[in-house]
Image: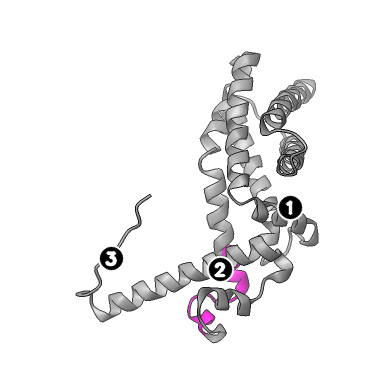
Amino acid sequence: MNSLTFNTSSAPAESKRELAKSKTRRALLKSALQLYSQEGAQGMSMNKVAKGAGIAQPSFYNHFDSLDALQSELCEQLKENYLSPMRLAWVNMLKDYDVLNKEEFDQQCQQGLIMIFDSAFQNIALFQHLIEDRPRFSPKKENKGLGNLITEIQQEWTEIFIQGLQLSGRFFERSDVNLCVDIAASQVHELILGCHQQRYSRQQAISILSHNFDALFVSLFARKNNKK
């Protein structure tokens, strides 16, 4: 990918200042991401983040009100980068679940799972720390930070599942969808880490997950029918 360049020689002084501020803000976000990937939540500090971006700690406040504010913005960026490529694929699969045969379901499900695995392995160190840190953080904490990113992603997955199921013409209890998503996410996280530890191949993991997801959806639809 070609990098963008800017000719600032004739730019007004204010524009140059804004460009410099934007560059430093991005550097702070990048520094925080690298630091978290290396040390997890316990290693995060404003001083370390500022140092990694090449600025003094007091200058941090020219760009973010707090370390929590920086982490919140970074969380939103990571969440969108993670979910946006696969959101439509999962919505469509759930929307069409009733009319898909087993081979079609397996194909669509595995494509969606490949996207998840690819995203996790882009920064597997980050993924590991996110999984490890999750139990240490309360989802009710006002300033959630990176420690709750996995929980926030699962909440987004619930909304994706509900959207797809509603488009199929069916309406499910949120508690049933939450249960389905929690089970699915737990299996995905465990098998991604297992692949990273080379206990089995990615294709083996994706194949078993596709089979398990089919069983989960059969159970979900069965519970729906039993409640009628």
Q: Amino acid at mark 3?
A: Phe
Tell me: residue 160, above or below residue 135.
above
What secondary structure do most residues of the magenta stretch adopt? Answer: helix
Tell me: residue 149, above or below residue 68.
above
Mark closer to the chain start, 2 or 3: 3
| SS for dot 2 | helix
Mark 1, residue position: 131
Q: CA distance from mark 1 to mark 2?
A: 20 Å
Would residue 36 be found to the left or right of residue 27 on screen? right
Tell me: residue 107, above or below residue 114.
above
Where residue 138 sits in the image (x, y, percent)? 77, 61
Q: In terms of image quadrants, where is residue 142?
A: bottom right
Any magenta on residue 222? Answer: no
Mark 3, residue position: 6
Mark 2, residue position: 31
Residue range highlighted in magenta: 59-72
Q: Are the two marked residues, 1 and 3, in contact with CB atoms closer than 8 angstroms?
A: no
Q: 204 and 156: which one is in front?
A: 204
| SS for dot 3 | loop
Q: Quadrant of the C terminus?
A: top right
